[in-house]
Amino acid sequence: MPESDDRLDRREFLRRAGLSAAGLALGAPFGRTSSPAKRPNLIYVFADQLRASAVGYAGDRRARTPHIDRLAAQGVSFSNAVSTMPVCAAHRASLFSGLYPSTTGMVVNELRVNPAHRCLGHVLTEAGYETGYIGKWHLWGNIAGNHEADASHYIPPQSRRYRLGFDGYWAAYNFNHQYKKAFYFGDSPRRVLVDGYEPDVQTDLALRFIRDKARKPKPFALVLSYGVPHDPWTDDNVLKEDVRPFEGVDFPLPETWADTPDPYMDRDTDPARWLAVFKPSLPGWRRNYYAMNANLDRNVGRLLRALEEGGIAADTIVVFSSDHGEMFGAHGRVQKLTFYEEAARVPFLVRWPGRVPAGSVRDACLGTPDILPSVLGLMGLPIPAGVEGMDLSRLALGKGGPEPEAAFLQGMGHTYEWIDGFEWRAVRDKRHTYAVYRRDGSEHLYDNVDDPFQKINRAADPALGPTLRGFRDRLAEKRRELQDTFEVCTWYRDHWTDGDRRILRGARG
């Protein structure tokens, strides 16, 4: 049977989460006392494949995310945040550069980023921050599907510019989602194997970094890129103690499930396999997905507790987000790389006690390129010239200010292969999502307020004719601004890369 709308009102969840910013429990500090002259520290945490609806503060009764819910109760939630291109590498390139995928050239996964852009790490390092990066990077690989070779993960000294300015502590890898086989690379070619569940180990490293840097005069900035809750959602890839609370919990098929897979999906479209494998597996996969989210939440709690016990919570901006969501059978789709809400919408929380109003919600149409200027705006740091996103820091601080009329989304092709036929573009404002496929010009228009599960495509509804035309004009205008010519996937390979999956250029040079 379809998944019901089993959700609590968001404000009620925030009330239950409680614990306002003024009520932070502080222990014996290991850091420094708050100083108005000191720039804030930054901890930017993002999960992989965590959709916006799969957390308690968003109203999901199944979720066990008390620490993430508390983070929402103590800060601001951007309720209309989306992943501009809902795949891993494209999001990361946009996150760190403030540019759209058409400009970074990161049009599919498993490409090597162009290091010419001025990025978050550069600004932080030049401003005197002690920087750290822990976890998944996914901007170095150029061998599709080969995630085992050390050369796919280790960035040698002569190529440090590919770390995009994160010149401090480095404990990263390009791609790994076998969470009981954790590893990372530092500044040497030796693979560091670690014993333990990967998110727990990464949090251990983060706590060590925080406690070390908090004692020093310089501010610190840490990016923590967790792999969970990205698949595989097999029983051997989760901890039993995390699964146990979800035993007996019902995980029905989504309301928009279809026994025929969506032909516009870039993979997993075999009808026989869809019914024989995906349909019966989805309940178990979702159970393990929620278990991974519970583990993620527990580790977020460890981070918050360290800031509070160290007396540096008020000095530290904490951002929590995700690179994209997961479809889990909705609209006849699995995976990501689509404009539908389950894949495109992501959580985006900002906590800065005493500065960001606790428990606030902003409905600005925040897209991935807006993150870099907004974070730097909060920190009082210069925003690089040429950034394509908008600084929304005033909104995070509870003030008025300009905001995007809509978010622009790009689907440049296949998730990681050079295959044509899956390209799309979309525009999402505070009420509607409009999308168009390149291969046949088919259009989609959804009312996300009256139809939150996007069951009815209203592109052919005469009553919405003016709305449809308005979105067409918005899309055309944004494409002209970005010089996005909406090509087939292989065109980008032939014009923007060296043929060996290294990006040479994007739409704007």
Image: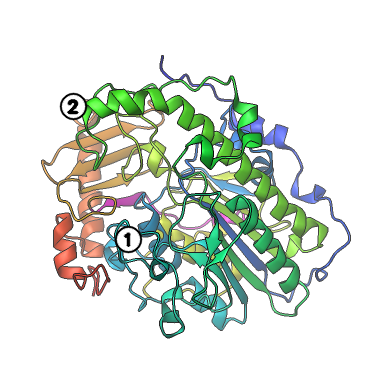
Q: Residues within 10 Å of mark 1 (few under 14, many from 20)?
A: many
Q: Quadrant of the C terminus?
A: bottom left
Q: Residues within 10 Å of mark 2 (few under 14, many from 20)?
A: few
Question: Quick check: can you spot residue 267?
Answer: yes
Question: Quick check: can you spot residue 359?
Answer: no
Q: Earlier in the sequence, mark 2 or mark 1?
A: 1
Q: Nearer the viewer, residue 21 or 399?
A: 21
Query: Residue tagged by mark 1?
Result: 110
Q: Which residues are magenta?
A: 395-412
Place residue 418 in its image quadrant.
Answer: bottom left
Q: Nearer the viewer, residue 463 or 42?
A: 42
Q: Nearer the viewer, residue 211 or 187?
A: 187
- Say which residue appears at 42% left-offset and 85% top-offset: 158
Q: Which element is circle 1 on?
A: loop
Q: Is residue 61 left or right of residue 465?
A: right
Q: Quadrant of the N terminus?
A: top left
Instruction: List x then y, in percent, for residue 38.
Output: 72, 75
- Say which residue appears at 31% left-offset and 56% top-offset: 145
- Say which residue appears at 49% left-offset and 40% top-offset: 52
- Does the magenta-highlighted stretch encompass residue 340? no
Q: Is residue 252 left or right of residue 64?
A: left
The three-letter code of the residue at mark 1 reads Glu
- Does the magenta-highlighted stretch encompass residue 406? yes
Q: As drawn, which residue projects farthest toward the left?
A: 440
Place residue 350 in its image quadrant.
Answer: bottom right
Query: Residue tagged by mark 2?
Result: 462
Q: Which mark is residue 118?
A: none
Instruction: List x then y, in percent, for residue 46.
Output: 53, 54
